[in-house]
Amino acid sequence: MEENKQIRIDKFLWSVRLYKTRSIASDECRKGRILINNVQVKPSRVVLKNEIMIVKKPPVNYSFRVIEPIENRVGAKLVELYIEDLTPSDEKAKLDVRLAGGIVYRDKGTGRPTKKERRLIDKLSDDTNDL
């Protein structure tokens, strides 16, 4: 790859599969959810080697180091050649707690929950959202 080739942050985020479409990546930049070196960036910002990038996908704030900027979308197995995941394990644990706590299992054929059961389900889901 050429050294002077400039890659936009929205295109880079799309190419390393952090977002499904480039327009979603652009929107996230505009919302201030993408930070490079702790500074909010616009979608047109150029990505450089060895920059630390923070991607806010609530409830988790992911951290990545850019190994090599790329322009074209790559397969999921090749993503690790271009970005390094620096996200602490306690940040990733937030996602596991939220997914595990929010599921309420009901047997098939039991019908709609009663008012008492609905209140219990709402209380459980509110408790997991506070994490």
Image (cartoon, rainbow, N blue to C red):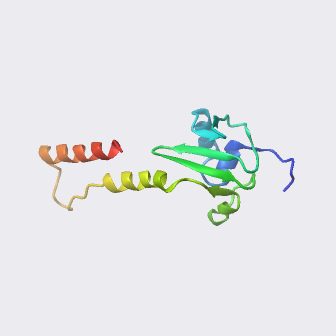
Q: Residue at x 67, y 64 (%)?
A: 78
Q: Quadrant of the C terminus?
A: top left
Q: Is residue 19 visible?
A: no
Q: Residue at x 37, y 51 (%)?
A: 98
Which corner quadrant of the image does residue 16 belong to?
A: bottom right
| Above or below 76: residue 128 | above
Which corner quadrant of the image does residue 103 belong to?
A: bottom left
1 sits to left or right of 71 = right
Residue nearest the observer in this picture, 118 or 84: 84
Q: Residue at x 66, y 41 (%)?
A: 36
- Give coordinates of residue 43: x percent, y percent: 68, 37
Q: Residue at x 49, y 56 (%)?
A: 89
Q: Most extreme residue toward the bottom, as rendered?
A: 77
87 sits to left or right of 102 = right
Q: Is residue 3 visible?
A: yes
- Give coordinates of residue 86: x percent, y percent: 59, 54
- Give coordinates of residue 70: x percent, y percent: 75, 53
* Total labels drawn: 0
Residue nearest the observer in this picture, 95 or 28: 95
- Give coordinates of residue 1: x percent, y percent: 84, 56
Residue nearest the observer in this picture, 108 or 69: 69
